[in-house]
Image (cartoon, rainbow, N blue to C red):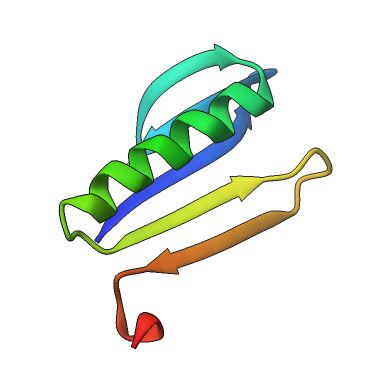
Amino acid sequence: MVRFAVTLKNGDWTVFSDGAPVAGDLTRSAAVQMAKDLAFEAEARGEPVELLIQGYYGEMSRRITGGPEDD
């Protein structure tokens, strides 16, 4: 499973892939779009994906695709 996350780190929105930063110093909307694009590409390769996105107030939303939940 590939994991992508968008979080606020040191005052900047950052995109992570499997725990490693991919891009930082982004607006939240740009970071969310990048994470969704990366997730779409992974899904197109047939990989299961977990996508975590932090909200403005610290809450997290989670989406998992390609696993048993999709059956």
In the rendered structure, the answer to whether residue 56 lies left or right of residue 19 reads: right
Q: In which quarter of the image is residue 22?
A: top left
Q: Quadrant of residue 31?
A: top right
Q: In the rendered image, is residue 2 in sight?
A: yes
| Figure disc tally | 0
Picture quarter with the N terminus: bottom left
Residue drawn at point x = 59 percent, y = 15 percent: 26
Which residue in the rendered view is the most extreme toward the right? 57
Depicted 53 relative to depicted 28: above or below = below
In the rendered structure, the answer to whether residue 17 lies left or right of residue 12 reads: left
In the rendered structure, the answer to whether residue 27 lies left or right of residue 36 reads: right
Image coordinates of residue 63 in percent, x first then y, are 51, 63
Closer-to-camera residue (25/33): 33
Depicted 2 relative to depicted 69: above or below = above
Which residue in the rendered view is the most extreme toward the top? 25
Image coordinates of residue 69 in percent, x first then y, are 40, 84
Image coordinates of residue 43 in percent, x first then y, are 27, 55
Residue drawn at point x = 53 percent, y = 52 percent: 52
Residue drawn at point x = 38 percent, y = 67 percent: 65
Which residue in the rendered view is the most extreme toward the left? 45
Residue drawn at point x = 56 percent, y = 62 percent: 62
Q: In the rendered image, is residue 18 in sight?
A: no
Depicted 53 relative to depicted 8: above or below = below
Image coordinates of residue 55 in percent, x first then y, are 74, 44
Depicted 20 relative to depicted 54: above or below = above
Q: In which quarter of the image is residue 37?
A: top left
Picture quarter with the C terminus: bottom left
